[in-house]
Amino acid sequence: MKRTVLLLSLALLLPVAHAQLAATAPSQSVPGDPRPDAPELSARGPYAVGVRTLTLTNPGQLDIANAPKEGDIPRYARPLTVEVWYPALGDSGSGSTTYTDVLGSGPGDPKRPNTPFTIPGRATRDAPPVAAKAPYPLVIVSHGYPGSRFLMTYLTENLASKGYVVAAIDHTDSTHGDKAAFASTLLNRALDDNFVLSELARLGAAGSGSPLSGLINADETALVGYSMGGYGALNAAGAGYAPEVLPLVPGGALKERQTGNYKVDPRIKAVVAFAPWGGDAAVKGIGVNFGGKYGFWDDAGLAGLKVPTLFVVGDRDDVAYDEGGVKPLFENAVNAERYLLVYENASHNTAPNPPPAAALNSFDDYMHYAEPAWDMSRLNNINQHFVTAFLDWKLKGKTEDAAYLNVPTPRSNDIKVSRNADGTPKADDTSWKGFKARTARGIKLYRMMPK
């Protein structure tokens, strides 16, 4: 009888205990939420996050997507939609919003229609900013081809919570919904980055009358680009294109982005290039059998990159490629302090959010986001960790964060854990700073300094 009463009491208590656990357990339903094994700097920062949508127009731009076969290329007012995240009033992680995007690879594809889907976020639309700690460094985010300004919300929200203003661009002619001529992307990526930088500097200046007034320190700007976004970010930061690739854009328009033909905006202080497209193997991978020594670049072009740069790639990347693709860019950007983060067994999708539920019924849409050998939430957390360390060091001057990047052994699987009885590391310990025990697996991190 006593046993029956005890079991009955436990049965009545279990729903209560389960409800309490559900109320306190961390959620991973939102891109960017930390897993229990997330490295140290992936944690959300001290600020709540606000978000706003801007509609910008860049006048007098070449309309490459509608260029005639012969004659002058028409000009147009180029529209750009930009999502801006910023530190906001409230508790860290307290916001809630929904971003709307579409699947597909451009309009009019019956095999991959532009199916709408939503992405949950931890930001508040048009929230009041934390003005007392402003201005904040600026981070400009550029998606792949095709992609959208919401492709990396796990990272944009995370950086905003740590005291950055983050502006992600919808590159016209290059989104899931409006994908057009590839030549438009080849020309416009760096131009869009530069224009958005100048516009955010104007809107973020004190007294501008914008809701962003006084929030942005554009003199400390980083470019974060994925795939074609990485291609454009490298060029905007100084890696001029080789003369051999000029025929790929009508009217010789790409000449203005050639080595020696443009000046780098001095406000650009750092670059994060996720799987940047444009290396020799990448160019040959789309059937183009001409180009510079390194695809879109030659030695002179890569020598023009002088700002600190973090390259990220999967060693099985079959779009940007590691060997013959990204690795030679890293090795030959000889005038930049640079880092190369390599995910073992990862292919090209080292930057996006996890696949949305709407992609589960389409292999192609699913594989636009997923890494088969990696849990995407895990990969996202590692990206947050290293990007935070890199930007805090290079834009905010937190020199102590160098220890997260200057790892004692380049291959995480070779780490030697050697500790004293009190848990402190011995002289021969080669653990990576910020990773919990047994969690630094399957990644490599290399460093090269300017010559």
Image (cartoon, rainbow, N blue to C red):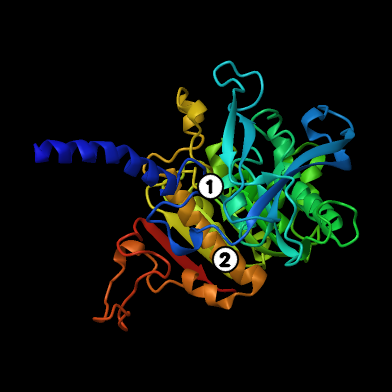
CA–CA distance between discs 2 and 1? 16 Å
- Amino acid at circle 1: Ala
Residue 218's image quarter?
bottom right
Foreground: 181 or 209? 209
How far across and down, in percent of the image, does residue 65 sit?
77, 31
Please tell me whether residue 21 is drawn above or below residue 222 in the rendered image: above
- Residue 242 can be seen in this image: yes
- Say left or right for 4 vs 172: left
Tell me the residue at 54%/66% (across/down): 389
- Look at mark 1 in the image and give the residue it sits on: 351
Earlier along the polypeptide chain: callout 2 or callout 1? 1
Tell me the residue at 65%/18% (across/down): 108
How far across and down, in percent of the image, does residue 405 sit?
49, 69
Using a 10 Å C-alpha cutoff, classify the residue at mark 2 as few (fewer than 14 neighbours), some (14 to 19) or many (20 or more).
many
- Amino acid at circle 2: Phe
Q: Secondary structure at mark 2?
A: helix
Tell me the residue at 66%/67% (across/down): 307
Residue 252's image quarter?
top right
Foreground: 66 or 283? 66
How far across and down, in percent of the image, does residue 365 sit?
51, 28
Tell me the residue at 69%/50% (across/down): 50
- Say left or right for 344 vs 253: left
Count of picture labels: 2
Q: In the picture, which quadrant includes the C terminus?
A: bottom right
Residue furthest top as drawn: 110
- Residue 334 can be seen in this image: no
- Look at mark 2 in the image and give the residue it sits on: 390
Using a 10 Å C-alpha cutoff, classify the residue at mark 1 as few (fewer than 14 neighbours), some (14 to 19) or many (20 or more).
many
